[in-house]
Image: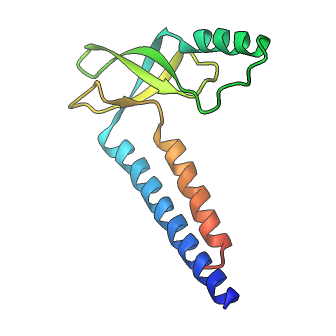
Amino acid sequence: MVRAMVAIFYLWLGRLALAAAVLCALQAVRLLVFRRPARAHLLYDGYRRWKADSDSAWFRGQPPVLGHRITDRLAFDNEEGRTIRLDVQRRPTRADPRRLVWYDPRRPERATATGPHIWALWAIAFAAFFASLGY
């Protein structure tokens, strides 16, 4: 009975890993086909504010806040030469002052800093996990 339950668990786990791999691969392809890359300039770095708050909390003896997101203000020029300013949320790591964003040419204010290479790596990781289950 327990072996059957474990087998069913691994079957569903494999299906979930395969579905996640396919969805990540589709997102990578969607970004490559329908989005355009643009080099963005950092106008406001939310890291400095987060670092100051984090350090002061540490000195007061409070634990760090996990899962916190910070907001950066970026500006980039689209294909028509128009400057677009937008806010991007990210995990608190030191930012590169010039970063690559992927934007929708029809709606340039919809941009993401997570490029297709990240989605492709996640797809490979999920596919490797799926393969390690013995399918």
Q: Looking at the picture, does residue 21 appear above or below residue 116?
A: below
Residue at (79, 17) in percent of width and height: 61
Residue shown at 68% from the left, 71% from the top: 132
The answer to which image quadrant residue 59 occupies is: top right
Of all residues, the one furthest to the front in this rendering is 61
The outermost residue toward the bottom is: 1
Residue 30 placement (x, y as % from top left): 35, 48
Q: Is residue 41 left or right of residue 54?
A: left
Q: Position of residue 66 (x, y in %)?
A: 64, 31
Say how many tags the image has.
Answer: 0
Q: Which of the image's four quarters has the N terminus?
A: bottom right
Vertical position of residue 9 compared to residue 62: above or below: below
Q: Residue at x 64, y 11 (%)?
A: 53
Taking the image as shown, residue 37 lies to the left or right of residue 12, namely left
Compared to 51, does 100 lie above or below?
below
Viewer-nearest residue: 121 or 110: 110
Q: As rendered, which of 16 and 96 lies closer to the eye?
A: 16
Looking at the picture, how far across and down is residue 114, in whole percent? Answer: 48, 35
Q: Is residue 36 left or right of residue 24?
A: left
Residue 3 image point, x, y percent: 69, 88
Query: Does 9 sit left or right of 98 as displayed?
Result: right
Pick whichever, 98 or 79, lies toward us.
98
Colour mapping used in the image: rainbow
In which quadrant will I find the C terminus? bottom right
Residue located 46% across and 43% down the image: 116
